[in-house]
Image (cartoon, grey):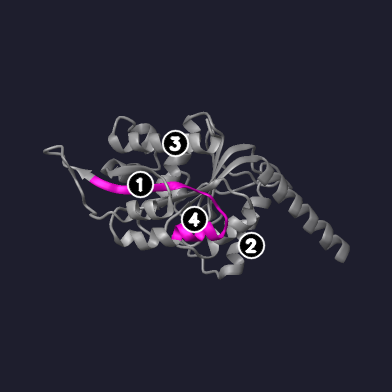
Amino acid sequence: MEKNMNAEKEKQERYLKENIERIKHKIIILSGKGGVGKSTIAVNLAYGLAANGKKVGILDVDIHGPSIAKLLGIEGQLLRPNRPGDRPEPIKVNENLYALTIATLLGSPDNPVIWRGPLKMKLIKQFLQDIEWPSLDYLIVDSPPGTGDEPLSAVQIIGQLDGAIIVSTPQDLALLDARKTINFSKKLNVPIIGIVQNMTAFKCPHCGNYIDIFEGTGTEKAARDFGVEILGKIPIDKKIVETCDKGKAYIKDFKELESAKSMVKIVDRVIKKIEKV
């Protein structure tokens, strides 16, 4: 029996190694606090990379509050193998984009996941070893807010990441959270690609002027103190909310709007920094 167990363990480790080796670039999306639009940025980054002809996977490691399925319009699609005995493949969103989230394993989005740390780490490992991932140019890992079990597990299991993108909002309160997330990345030897400042301002529909909803310079100060680049600043746009609720690609469907233009510039900067083009 011990021989069989060792053989199974070796097989699983081989699957994990093969999957990770099929991925050229790996990026983790982090935020110090919730409600800053981290998953929205992750999804639009994935759409933007896919629109540039990149093969992209997005892995949602938010076990308790997964939102990627809703944002990508794949709610209700369950993970299944193509044939009995095969490993299941991630959900194909479009020709260049694949997604995996615990929501594709649950029968209902209303089902809560009440797990402690070890179970969550085991599931994240299974996401990367028991799934037949295709060859990818990029894997985007969307983690829950903070510096807890999920982002830590993802970093440890994946190993060498190309870097982290930190999502924050402008107010000074975000300074504390951004600094913690930057230090989290540094302690785990994950390079910081940059900071995305979301919800920067709101364009008045009457006068056309931009209004700062969240005042402050927290993210700028964190960027200066740690020598981190601000990849871009994204204004508030109600169309972002609408596309999120409908599972549509804001960066593609509303590319003439300022927020989408900001997202496109962020995607371009990420490609240049990662691929050094």
Element class at badge 3: helix
Q: Is residue 186 magenta-colored?
A: yes
Q: Nearer the viewer, residue 132 or 147?
A: 147
Circle 1 packing at 10 Å, graded few (<14), some (14-19), many (20+), is few
Image point (29%, 48%), residue name = 199
Please state the horizontal and vertical placement of residue 3, each as a whole percent of the image. Answer: 88, 62
Q: Quadrant of the N terminus?
A: bottom right
Identify the residue position indicated by label 4 in the image. Answer: 143
Q: Nearer the viewer, mark 1 or mark 2?
A: 2
Residue 80 appears anywhere in the view:
yes
Element class at badge 2: helix
Identify the residue position indicated by label 3 in the image. Answer: 269
Disc 3 residue type? Arg
Disc 4 residue type? Ser
Q: CA distance from mark 2 to mark 4?
A: 15 Å
Q: Nearer the viewer, mark 2 or mark 4?
A: 4
Image point (43%, 50%), residue name = 227
The tag on residue 122 is: 2
Q: Nearer the viewer, mark 1 or mark 4?
A: 4
Q: Nearer the viewer, mark 4 or mark 3?
A: 3
- Tell me whether the residue at label 4 lies in contact with that at label 3, contact meaning CB atoms closer than 8 angstroms: no
Q: CA distance from mark 3 to mark 2?
A: 34 Å
Identify the residue position indicated by label 1 in the image. Answer: 245
Boundaries of the magenta span: 181-201
Q: CA distance from mark 4 to mark 3?
A: 21 Å
- Left or right: residue 154 versus residue 205 is right
Disc 2 residue type? Lys
Element class at badge 1: helix
